[in-house]
Image (cartoon, grey):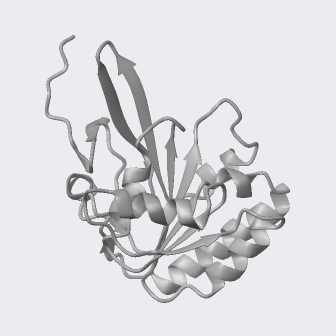
Amino acid sequence: MSMSRLATGIDVLDRQLGGGIPAGSIVLLAADPASQSELFLHELTTTRGTLWLTTIRSEQAVTDALERNPVPTGNPTVRDVGGDAPLDAASSLVRDLPEGANLVIDVVDVLERSEPPRYRRFLNDLQTHMVNTQGLTVLHGLKGETIPDNRDLTEHMADVVFDLDTKIDGSEIVNRLAVPKFRGGRALNETIKLRLAERVTVDTSRDIA
């Protein structure tokens, strides 16, 4: 299998990761609900054709948020799969993904509340499809009070885990990104301090211990 890399749309991250994410990968982006993690998904849409499956917000809400972003974004196909059978709806759309496309599932928590055997089958089918089409999937998972039981399954199946930590420190909001897991490459030994404003950039302000 070729180990070509796919850009995330975030230059600093792609450099740290040796050119991006290996094609065919599933990425878990775990973040607090009250964070700017959505900017990661917006940046991803600029890189290649993207199917955005929304499970909580409406299609219109996702489209509006992309259009309101002051920085140019891509033009993803947005589909609401948060109805009665979200796993079935997501599965049927994933099967039609073309070669080299992005898939965003925002948020994956709704699918993680399915029965473990069904969710496991979904992840295995997704992984096979990503490898076959050399695409890239980002599963946006929330780190709230009620993390779904199947989050362990998601973390294990994911090829790459991005863990975004958002803290309020005095008058400053501090965002740190850890990459504790990276199949097909090296995980990062240290966190990256990021600025999440209109887009994702490195925070070059110095930490004063």
Image quadrant in which you'd find residue 54: bottom right
Q: Nearer the viewer, residue 33 or 100?
A: 33
Drawn side of residue 106 relative to residue 88, left or right: left
Figure quadrant of the N terminus: bottom left
Image quadrant in which you'd find residue 149: top right
- The x and y percentages for residue 62 are 51, 61
Res 101 visible: yes
- The x and y percentages for residue 59 are 58, 67
Res 138 visible: no
Q: Nearer the viewer, residue 119 or 183?
A: 119
- Seen at 67% across and 46% down, the residue is 151
Figure quadrant of the C terminus: top left
Q: Nearer the viewer, residue 19 or 177?
A: 177
Q: Nearer the viewer, residue 16 or 39?
A: 39
The answer to whether residue 163 is above or below residue 90 is above
- Seen at 28% across and 63% down, the residue is 9
- The x and y percentages for residue 64 are 46, 62
The answer to whether residue 128 is above or below residue 166 is below
- Seen at 42% across and 83% down, the residue is 100
Marks counted in the figure total 0
- Seen at 52% across and 44% down, the residue is 30
